Image (cartoon, coloured by chain):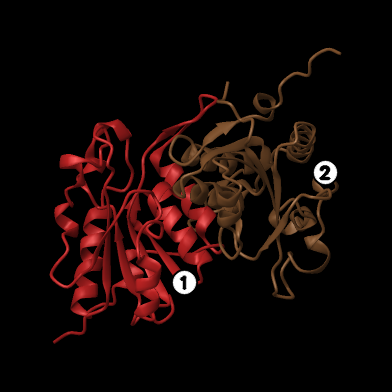
Chain colours: A brown, B red
Amino acid sequence: MVSDLSSAVLLVIDMQEAFDHPRWGQRNNHEAESNVANLLAEWRRTRRPVIHIHHVNPKPDSLFNGKGVQVKPEAVPVEGEPVLTKNVNSAFIGTDLEERLKLMKASQLIVTGLSTDHCISTTARMAGNLGFDTFVVSDATATFERKGLSGQHYTAEEMHDTALMSLEGEFATIVSTKELIKPKAVS
Amino acid sequence: MVSDLSSAVLLVIDMQEAFDHPRWGQRNNHEAESNVANLLAEWRRTRRPVIHIHHVNPKPDSLFNGKGVQVKPEAVPVEGEPVLTKNVNSAFIGTDLEERLKLMKASQLIVTGLSTDHCISTTARMAGNLGFDTFVVSDATATFERKGLSGQHYTAEEMHDTALMSLEGEFATIVSTKELIKPKAVS
């Protein structure tokens, strides 16, 4: 079981329709959206802080311009939840996320959203290196297959696993949604 | 062929003896050291800027404390080459690297050193996100095998390849040592 997370901040990153585009190729973990929804419900129920990060790219041909920036239904912010906009991978670059977390005296971050080896990995690496106690939720993120420069092909699951293995113990602790949602007391 | 790199800065990251410790497990690309040495020789010959980054960890049980911080013979700095010390993975966190590069009006960075999926990947991600035109030299870096949380095992070569594939096109351009060393004119 993970340590006490009673004041941990839930970061929900790039849960946007741009990631439904076929250009990305095969994806793993289609449960990521419902796991993010469950974590959001749990954080709201326990009145813990949530911060949403959305990607917007000013280039007209970007998938993150126009319709693609729309937030997936499982991750729509509610009143009072801050929404920060970024235009690179790291949620800490070009935003006030670090200052905001310091003002909140936040020390623990739970990182969720898309995609594992791009924005999630980059944000978790910076979070860890900036001194936050960082947790990445393995089943509340997902990524895509990639083709290598020498013709190698790695599946989405392989890209996801290796990205998480590079984070574990060095930048973050890898956890599952189940570990973060305590069973509700019978009423 | 890559674009004109006549004023590109060569970053040489964590080329230190700590990485020879057996604790890391099996490593790929044992040519990384000689490729870094060849790139350093080429950068010095063409009088282009070199910046060394060394890792030092204040914890007494760290491999990067004591003897392990010693620089590998292939990457020993020469007079006039700045040496920055960091104690996290990113060469941009806790150092003046970004300010220094801006003062130099540097726009292109060549990233080399150890290890592919930890300090090299983290530094290249931040470099790309901070707006630098970033190149990672695939055969002038290396990494180690890793064991996953669910018992998966990935070889050092698989960890290296997937780390580079996650960088390519999103944060950096992946190049080889050979592409960066132009054949010398016959004298």
Q: Distance between the residues labelled 2 and 1?
A: 35 Å
Residue B169, by quadrant, is bottom right
- Helix, strand or loop at mark 1: loop
Q: In which quarter of the image is residue A100?
A: bottom right
Is residue A148 among the parts visible in the rendering?
no
Instruction: Decide if residue A30 is on the left or right side of residue A91.
Output: right
Q: Residue at 82% x, 59% y: name it.
A: A70
Q: Could you tell me residue B92's position as x and y percent? A: 40, 60
Which of the two residues, B16 or B142, is positioned nearer the viewer here?
B16
Q: Residue A43 in the image: x percent, y percent?
A: 74, 35
Would residue A107 appear left or right of B80 to someone viewing this image? Answer: right
**Callout 2: SS:** helix
Residue A121 picture location, percent across and down:
55, 48
Amino acid at the residue labelled 2? Glu
Residue B24 lies in what quarter of the image? Answer: top left
Vertically, is B84 above or below A125?
Answer: below
Q: Nearer the viewer, residue B132 or B173?
A: B132
Residue B145 in sight: yes
B95 relative position to A156: left or right: left
Chain hosting mark 2: A
Mark number, residue B132: 1
Report the chain holding disc 1: B
- Residue at the disc numbered 2: A74
User: How many other residues sit within 10 Å of disc 2, few (<14), some (14-19) or many (≥20)?
Assistant: some
